[in-house]
Image (cartoon, helix red, strand yellow):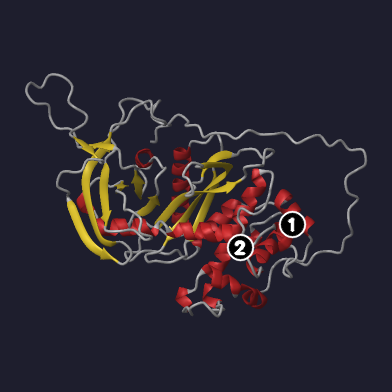
């Protein structure tokens, strides 16, 4: 009912579109195919009209998602993964606000980008291996957006909603945000230094960090050094770590984790975001974690993995727990795959990004419906599939059982009114070609210092 109430315009058509996505017997391949579902009592024209002229109160949906039960770790800490997924639109020259989105190709490793709409999704992570996450927010990145500033604002807004929903209170463990490579995690640490958050993310293995500066030897005249001894991640040997842990993992074999605290990079003003920083550039300290594994699944060669943790004191946390939390970040990849391959997140060929935003939020709402219906679902497995318990049901198997659940719960959408076909396009109307829009690039805005 909260989702229906958050649709002030075209609510019936939008809600039935969500039901059609969940009750389809197979993967969603196109919007017109969804209009053939029995739960969608309106034609395909009403479906496109709802996406074009409908309205969704995104703030209300975000607040409702923050109020749902969130997966947590053993210590009740909230861990949230942030990652960008692309909606490819390579041939949509009439669609504005497209960017060159990262899309790695394993075939030859050359085609790395594709024009499309990038969406940054925040999803709560559980404490164990699972295909479920708790999506909380989605933001589309535009050509003029500073990705780091948008990420910091998204985290701050999410913290406000978690407080209002009672998910986080003073005295609770700080919220942990887990990031993959591609984020400027050092600048994020600086922008969010006054927030109750911790950041854990992967950094490049060729970076150079520095120890805290020592005192100048000899006479005290002159400026004191700002950086201490260099710590080169690519070197074969490093100083003794503050912590070291060795464990056995069923997928990676022998895993050794080491961490060093109080390290910082050397910032330069020509780097994006620091050009207009007032005064002297800060030394943003954090903890470095190096992870070495015995082997990788698929007989791949293990590469060096370096993580950055925003807490500079390396003795204040368990190094073995940090890399296990980072592994949980890959659960969001299962969510993206389910969004795209099953729910059809990138299937519609919509022209305007505002229409795409509405469709994205409908997909997130549909996934939230599956999370709520998980306790009512049955294991409708195929003959070749293994049986699963109620706690082990995947989003795909819950979706198979959703048509029966919908029959029990009903729908708040009102039946359509009797109508007849419209007159169509007026005769003699000019049909000028739609304007073409070039593919943009993200620009780094000037960094505004945080209070």
Residue 428 horizontal side relative to residue 343, left or right: right
Tell me the quarter of the picture where residue 10 sits.
bottom right
Of helix, strand and loop, which one carries label 1?
Answer: helix
Near-viewer residue (9 or 100):
100
Mark 2 vs mark 1: in front: 1
The residue under label 1 is 47
Residue 294 horizontal side relative to residue 76, left or right: left
Of helix, strand and loop, which one carries label 2?
Answer: helix
What's the residue at 62%, 64% (across, down)? Answer: 27
Point out the residue furthest to the top here. Answer: 221
Residue 246 x %, y %: 21, 60
The residue under label 2 is 2
Image quarter (top left, top right, bottom left or bottom right) of the C terminus? top left
Residue 336 x %, y %: 52, 57
What's the residue at 61%, 62% (across, down)? Answer: 2
Dot 2 and dot 1 residues touching (CB under 8 Å): no
Tell me if residue 318 can be seen: no
Tell me if residue 133 can be seen: yes
Residue 117 horizontal side relative to residue 12, left or right: left
Tag 1: Cα neighbours inside 10 Å, few (<14), some, or many (≥20)? many
Tell me the quarter of the picture where residue 128 sits.
bottom left
Residue 263 x %, y %: 23, 40
- The vertical placement of 250 against 83, above or below, is below
Tell me the quarter of the picture where residue 222 sits.
top left
- The vertical placement of 430 against 69, above or below, is above
Tag 2: Cα neighbours inside 10 Å, few (<14), some, or many (≥20)? few
Give the CA separation, mark 2 to mark 1. Answer: 21 Å
């Amino acid at each position: 009912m909260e989702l229906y109430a958050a649709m002030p315009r075209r609510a019936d058509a939008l809600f039935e579109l969500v039901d059609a996505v969940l009750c389809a017997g197979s993967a969603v391949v196109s919007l017109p195919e969804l209009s053939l579902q029995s739960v969608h009592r309106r034609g395909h024209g009403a479906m496109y009209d709802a996406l074009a002229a409908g309205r969704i109160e995104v703030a209300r949906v975000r607040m409702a998602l923050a109020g749902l039960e969130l997966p947590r770790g053993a210590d009740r800490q909230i861990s949230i993964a942030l990652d960008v997924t692309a909606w490819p639109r390579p041939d949509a020259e009439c669609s504005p606000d497209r960017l060159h989105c990262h899309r790695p190709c394993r075939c030859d490793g050359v085609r790395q980008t594709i024009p499309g709409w990038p969406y940054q999704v925040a999803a709560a992570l559980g404490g164990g291996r699972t295909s479920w996450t708790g999506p909380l927010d989605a933001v589309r990145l535009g050509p003029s957006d500073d990705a780091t500033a948008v990420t910091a604002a998204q985290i701050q807004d999410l913290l406000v909603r978690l407080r209002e929903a009672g998910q986080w209170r003073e005295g609770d463990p700080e919220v942990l945000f887990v990031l993959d490579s591609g984020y400027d995690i050092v600048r994020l640490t600086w922008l969010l230094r006054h927030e109750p958050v911790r950041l854990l993310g992967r950094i490049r293995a060729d970076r150079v960090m520095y120890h805290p500066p020592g005192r100048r030897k000899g006479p005290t005249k002159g400026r004191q050094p700002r950086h201490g001894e260099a710590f080169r991640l690519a070197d074969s040997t490093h100083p003794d770590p503050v912590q070291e842990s060795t464990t056995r993992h069923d997928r990676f074999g022998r895993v050794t984790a080491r961490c060093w605290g109080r390290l910082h990079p050397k910032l330069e003003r020509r780097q994006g975001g620091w050009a207009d920083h007032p005064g002297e550039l800060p030394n943003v300290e954090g903890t470095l974690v190096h992870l070495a594994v015995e082997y990788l699944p698929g007989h791949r060669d293990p590469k060096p993995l370096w993580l950055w943790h925003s807490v500079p004191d390396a003795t204040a946390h368990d190094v073995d727990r940090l890399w296990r939390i980072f592994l949980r970040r890959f659960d969001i990849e299962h969510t993206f795959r389910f969004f795209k391959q099953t729910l059809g997140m990138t299937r519609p060929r919509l022209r305007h990004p505002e229409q795409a935003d509405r469709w994205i939020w409908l997909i997130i709402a549909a996934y939230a419906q599956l999370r709520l219906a998980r306790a009512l679902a049955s294991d409708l497995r195929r003959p070749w599939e293994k049986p699963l318990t109620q706690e082990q049901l995947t989003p795909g198997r819950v979706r198979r059982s959703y048509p029966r659940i919908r029959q029990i719960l009903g729908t708040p959408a009102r039946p359509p009114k009797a109508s007849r076909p419209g007159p169509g396009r007026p005769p003699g109307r000019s049909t000028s070609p739609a304007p073409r829009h070039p593919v943009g690039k993200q620009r780094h805005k000037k960094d505004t210092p945080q209070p």
